């Protein structure tokens, strides 16, 4: 229940407004001056409604004294200047007396709803920052220190950055870190996975569409690039972008303008692009599946995200941080790894990288009956079993896609799709998409 403080020196208006708000389900406290309001300083109010002219100090002084509580100013002197002055002082809104009851109720509801959304957003941002630290990305191995140094150098610029690394290495976290350290940090960051859209729809999603541009285009639609105007757009899995869309993306990078599907109008945009892929784009250029001019443009500044198996002692630090996060999430405190579990974590080759590490630990936290995670809770030997070869040896013989095909074909007779996805450190949707792309038949 929201608690509202009403500051009004006319008893009839104070009583009337108090009753009006109480009928809407609000808890209301009424006082007659700023001095009386200050006596309530130990009480947390969600909104303060104050008359402008009060005995002693004016109602606008509460804007500073009661911060961060929003202050709605009432006045019978309904002039443009008084409204402007109140808003300049920091009032959340302004309403003239005599006010309409419906207008007052709508104004109060709008202010409280907005404050609640902002509060929830702040809490969410703190949780995200706690669970997935940005400036404090975990790792002090040499490849990570080099990556962090290069992030710090490129972040303050508006340069397009190509982020390269295997699946699950944390490419989106790198993109968020760049955005958070840039001059655009207070603007929007939009993340787009190019593999998540059908090939015939990706252009409309990115660049927008006109009504009737194609079958199913029932209305005008603003694209994600335009939605990110002034901020940052993170395009993941850029290797999945069709050639026509690659041409349109090159225009945006070179000219700073977009044209929606079916439109003749060019729209200027100011967007910083962060691009990511796990594919070898240079090989795709040679195979004529990726535009050479676009690759040349994207590769001007490249960041390589190291595979987890190449990060040495970082595995322990990451494992402990993830364990703390996962155990807090399901309200299980003070969990640890046994010495043997730690040894297995360090020695495992992590083909699914940090994402696989998170999935393995989350499963272990759920399965563990005590406070110490043992090697059987991790079940890494089950994943790495077979053929008498380690996963590292297999990876040396196969490309990433070949390894994926080999892994799925080997283990799908024993495990269902959910288990396979967890073992690979990917989602079921991602597993299905890769099955389609690599033409791996499902088990009968």
Image (cartoon, helix red, strand yellow):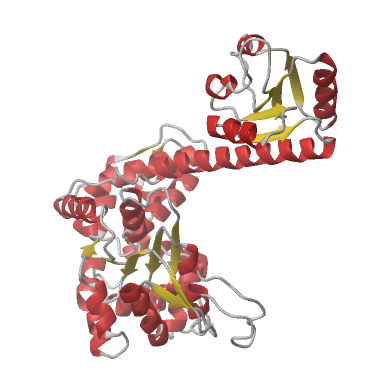
Q: Residue furthest left?
A: 142
Q: Nearer the viewer, residue 63 or 419?
A: 63
Q: In the visual, does 314 lie left or right of 27? A: left
Q: Residue at x 39, y 52 (%)?
A: 358
- Residue plotted at (55% across, 70% down): 222
Residue 195 horizontal side relative to residue 22, left or right: left
Residue 393 x %, y %: 20, 70
Q: Quadrant of the C terminus?
A: bottom right
Which residue is located at x 26 percent, y 45 percent? 316
- Looking at the rendered image, the quarter that the N terminus falls into is top right
Quarter holding residue 420 = bottom left
Res 39 quadrant in image: top right
Q: Is residue 412 visible?
A: no
Front one among 261 and 367: 261
- Indicate left or right for 266 with 75 as reference: left
- Where is residue 351? Give x, y as percent: 30, 65
């Amino acid at each position: 229940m929201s608690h509202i403080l009403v500051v009004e020196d006319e008893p009839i208006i104070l009583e009337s407004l108090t009753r009006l708000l109480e009928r809407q389900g609000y808890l209301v406290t009424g006082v007659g001056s700023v001095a009386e309001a200050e006596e309530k300083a130990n009480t947390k109010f969600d909104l303060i409604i104050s008359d402008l002219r009060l005995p002693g100090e004016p109602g606008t002084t509460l804007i500073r004294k009661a911060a961060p509580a929003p202050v709605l100013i009432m006045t019978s002197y309904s002039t443009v200047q008084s409204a402007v002055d109140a808003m300049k002082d920091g009032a959340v809104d302004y309403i003239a007396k005599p006010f309409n009851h419906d207008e007052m109720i709508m104004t109060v509801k709008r202010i409280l709803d907005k404050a609640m959304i902002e509060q929830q957003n702040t809490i969410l941002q703190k949780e995200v920052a706690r669970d997935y630290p940005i400036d404090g990305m975990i790792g002090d191995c040499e490849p990570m220190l080099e990556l962090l140094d290069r992030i710090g150098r490129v972040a303050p610029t508006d340069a397009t950055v190509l982020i390269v690394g295997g699946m699950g290495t944390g490419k989106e976290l790198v993109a968020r870190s760049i955005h958070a350290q840039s001059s655009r940090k207070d603007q929007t960051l939009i993340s787009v996975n190019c593999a998540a859209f059908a090939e015939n729809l990706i252009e409309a999603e990115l660049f927008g569409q006109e009504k009737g541009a194609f079958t199913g285009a029932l209305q005008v639609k603003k694209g994600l690039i335009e939605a990110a105007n002034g901020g940052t757009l993170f395009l993941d899995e850029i290797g999945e972008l069709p050639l026509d869309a690659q041409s349109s993306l090159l225009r945006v990078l070179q000219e700073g303008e977009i044209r929606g599907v079916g439109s003749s109008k060019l729209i200027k945009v100011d967007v910083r692009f962060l691009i990511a892929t796990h594919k070898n784009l240079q090989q795709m250029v040679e195979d004529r599946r990726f535009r050479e001019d676009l690759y040349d443009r994207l590769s001007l500044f490249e960041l390589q995200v190291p595979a987890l198996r190449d990060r040495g002692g970082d595995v322990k630090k990451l494992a402990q941080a993830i364990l703390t996060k996962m155990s807090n999430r399901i309200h299980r405190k003070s969990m640890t790894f046994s010495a043997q579990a730690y040894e297995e974590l360090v020695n495992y080759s992590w083909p699914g990288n940090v994402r696989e590490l998170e999935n393995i630990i989350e499963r272990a936290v759920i399965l563990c009956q005590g406070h110490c995670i043992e090697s059987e809770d991790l079940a890494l030997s089950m994943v790495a079993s077979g053929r008498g070869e380690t996963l590292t040896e297999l990876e040396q013989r196969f490309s990433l896609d070949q390894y994926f095909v080999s892994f799925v074909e080997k283990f799908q007779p024993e495990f269902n799709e959910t288990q396979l996805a967890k073992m690979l450190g990917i989602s079921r949707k991602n597993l299905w998409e890769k099955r389609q792309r690599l033409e791996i038949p499902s088990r009968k």
